[in-house]
Amino acid sequence: MAAAFKSLPASKKIASMLLGTGVAGGVALVASLEHNIKAADGDRFAHPPNLHWPHQNIWDSYDAKSIRRGYEVYKNVCQSCHGCFTVAYRMLRNVCMTPEEAKAEAKTFMHMDGPDDEGKMFERPGKTADYLKQPYANEAEAAFANGGKAPPDLGVITFARHGYENYIFALLTGYQEPPAGFELDEGLHFNPYFRGGALAMPPPIYNEVLEFSDGTPATKSQVAKDVACFLRFAAEPWHDERKQLGMKTMIYLSIITVAWGLVARKGHSTNQQTRVQFLQPRKSA
């Protein structure tokens, strides 16, 4: 075999070597892809659908009514297990509550404070400067109360997951029976939008899980949409200010661009219309 290869012309030798290299590379690529597919088989999940949100366009602001209802969902459904470290009660005023409502809402929770003059910690009613009360004192307590794993904090959960608000909505409304052949351990629930499919959290919402203060029917989809809007607000409370600043900046830049274009046009037109003539000097008599 080696003798036959040596007897081939140089061009055929190069072609044979390139062909062999290509075949070996293809085999290696197929094997690598198969290995990657097997490795990711346990992490497969469905991508959430791309939905339209009230604040989606660059000229849209947050829906204050939806954020208010979403806070009610968080308070009555989510706060028993999940914290939200990014939101203070003062941030709710003038967004989804009046200052008086935010102050009254803060007073409904007791917060640990101190030490006092005797060096002891004490509880006091909440103030608008306080952040939303955490359900557990620390992560170890949260893990112990939830089977060894602490529930995630929802402060920036929308930015920490693929799909942002779409993921929150799809996860909350996506609980279903596992497909045939899917092994689900006891105490877990199937959700195709969760990585791996097996989720320890039972379905948290359903139709009429609570009553909204504004009388909006609390359907499952409505509840999921409103809490997703609230969690987006929790992750980016400066959303409206950012868009306002961007629009003002674009207006200023547009004015500057138009003014610069007029000045440049005038300068070019002056250069194009100016006639320069060189005359020979007159000879003296």
Image: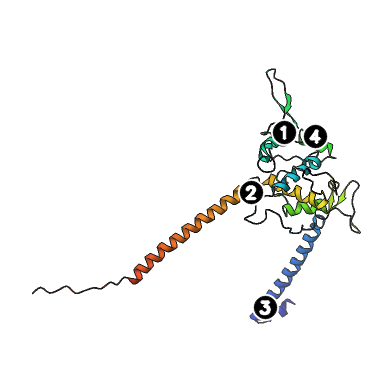
Q: Classify 14 as above or below 144.
A: below
Amino acid type for the residue under numbered disc 2: His
Sequence-earlier tag: 1 or 4:
1
Count of numbered labels shown in the rendering: 4
Rounded to the nearest whole Å, what is the CA distance between mark 3 and mark 4? 68 Å
Other-residue count near label 3 (Cα within 10 Å), few / some / many at <14 / 14–19 / ≥20: few
User: For the point 76% across and 53% down, which residue is it?
Assistant: 167
Of residues 201 and 273, which is closer to you in this image? 273
Amino acid type for the residue under numbered disc 1: Ala
- Res 104 label: 1
Of residues 254 and 39, which is closer to you in this image? 254
Other-residue count near label 2 (Cα within 10 Å), few / some / many at <14 / 14–19 / ≥20: some
Q: Which residue does the numbered mark 3 point to in the structure image?
A: 15
Sequence-earlier tag: 3 or 4:
3
Q: Nearer the viewer, mark 1 or mark 4?
A: 1
Left or right: residue 256 versus residue 240 is: left
Label 4: element kind: helix
Left or right: residue 264 versus residue 91 is: left
Q: Nearer the viewer, mark 4 or mark 2?
A: 2
